[in-house]
Amino acid sequence: MIKVDNVVKTFGGFRAVDGASLEIRQGAITGLIGPNGAGKTTLFNVIAGVLKPTSGKVTMMGEDITGLPPHDLFHKGLLRTFQIAHEFGSMSCRENLMMVPGNQSGESLWNTWFGRKRIADEERALRAKADEVLEFLTISHLAEQKASQISGGQKKLLELGRTMMVDAKIVFLDEVGAGVNRTLLNTIGDAIVQLNKERGYTFVVIEHDMDFIGRLCDPVICMAEGKVLAQGTLAEIKANEQVIEAYLGTGLKNKDMVGA
Amino acid sequence: MDLLNAFITLSNFVIIPAIAYGSQLALGALGVTLIYGILRFSNFAHGDTMAFGTMVTILFTWWFQHLGLSLGPFPTALLALPFGIAGCALFVLLTDRAVYRFYRVQKAKPVILVIVSMGVMFIMNGVVRFIIGPDDHNFGDGERFIISARTFREMTGLEEGLAIRTSTGITVVTAVVVVALLFWFLNKTRTGKSMRAYSDNEDLALLSGINPEKVVVVTWVIVAALATVAGTLYGLDKSFKAFTYFQLLLPIFASAIVGGLGSPVGAIAGGFVIAFSEVTITYAWKKVITYVVPESMAPDGLVQLLSTDYKFAVSFIILLVVLLFRPTGLFKGKSV
């Protein structure tokens, strides 16, 4: 579905992504793991259009999307969340969700004055949808709360909720689990699986929690030093010598549980 | 002791002029604050944007007067105002296309945009003087007073008169209407919310369905409208002179910063704080004091704290004090 072909991104002299190539299968939940500084987030940023690659190509279903601005990619169904949750602080959680879909008729100044009925209908539908999403994420009680006032974990849920406001095709989740407690992490995991099964979202997940990766992801891709080291099931990755060297560490070689 | 006459004098020379001036500053500061909050730079060209919009309004006023169009007791400028806004919006959008967009695409630092806006300021300043000349223009017509001092004296039998000029009345009413519309727009409409979203978190806004270029265009149009309205009201109240508008930049920035840059409510509060301080400090209090204290204690001098020549010093001092002690302003804007 997404093909990353020999992407390089340098910052000054530093090669954050150094010729990474990978393919993301439609309908899969792909895990992206690797040590800090491996270039995972940079690669996300390149794919999502936040950064332009120094060289290389990104295609989505055969179409070249290299360097397209984020809001264009958004309209193509490519969404991402942030490692550190972002929110529109001055708005309520419900409004945060209602902001997401683009091309609303209320965006035109003309309609603001002369298309009130259409806007009202649209807003009602959006509001219902936003409430549905909040319900799904078990945070209905936060609908009226200002987004700047909710907890870090709840912000992560809100991030995920944002992707549910539109018909996303592929969603890139950057460390959804970071700073989130177990119970909430399970809720997030359940939500991801459900979205994947019921709505056919393709997911790519950056995560350090191997339990979480093991439960959700197949295949798993391991990056280190800007390159793709290995790809396969988690078991295969865990057994890979290079991966152990670069990321998991030799000490964990014979243990069942890795990471966490 | 004559408190009633003292109060009338105070209203006539301090309260009413300060309310009118405060409304004009508030409208100006709203423009500055919107640019700061959404486009993230301090727009030094704002004073000259006001001058440009006012100039277009004046040109249309003259044309309408030539055609014999008028609004009866109201100034013809009100009829010309929409055209002024449209002209100003067009000019500002062209500037954005030609200049600011280049830096926005590069994600230039705010300080670079500030310097760029200074360049734009000089060009706009030149354009305005080139078209309408550097001189003073009075373009107010229609009824001069809602209540003149003499009518007031005859009505009440008081010694002091209270004059309310048409321009003052129009200023206050227009300011209230414009501010109400702006707040409704920012809080209730989708476009307004997109603007707030963009101001809250640009990164996230870019990764949602919000089209940044559209937000930028709408912001400029609103800012042009606010600037033209503020400039026209100021011109009706006093007179139009390109250089005066350039000088207005200081009290306008002081208002925006005192209120908290990026906060629309702050801009309004700041406008009135600056206006009231400026007017009260430069007012000669002799008359009011003479009414209030016993005759033997009446002052000989003018009791004027600062000559009107130094009125800009007032905004300067307030600006410095706020920046030193409360850099985010009264209403917790973004720190400068």
Image (tube, coloured by chain):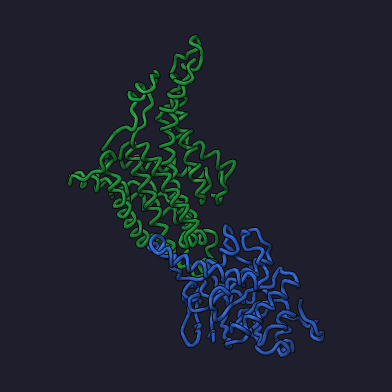
Chain colours: A blue, B green
Q: Looking at the image, can residue A15 be seen?
A: no
Compared to residue A22, the image places residue B209 above or below, namely above
- The answer to whether B103 appears left or right of B242 in the picture is right
Q: Residue B283, image x and y in percent?
A: 43, 26
Q: Residue B98, image x and y in percent?
A: 35, 61
Q: Residue A216, image x and y in percent?
A: 69, 83
Q: Residue B223, image x and y in percent?
A: 40, 53
> Residue drawn at (49%, 15%), measured in percent from left and top?
B1
Front residue of A23 and B217: B217
> Residue drawn at (74%, 86%), measured in percent from left and top?
A238
| Quadrant in which residue A213 is drawn | bottom right
- The answer to whether B294 appears left or right of A225 in the picture is left
- The answer to whether A121 appears left or right of B231 in the picture is right
Q: Looking at the image, can residue A25 be seen?
A: yes
Front residue of A194 and A211: A194
Give the farthest residue toward the left.
Answer: B67
> Residue drawn at (47%, 60%), measured in percent from left and top?
B189
- The total of numbered circles placed on residues is 0
Front residue of B150 and B229: B150
Compared to residue B30, the image places residue A198 above or below, namely below
Give the farthest residue toward the top.
Answer: B296
> Residue drawn at (62%, 75%), measured in percent from left and top?
A173
| Quadrant in which residue B156 is drawn | top left
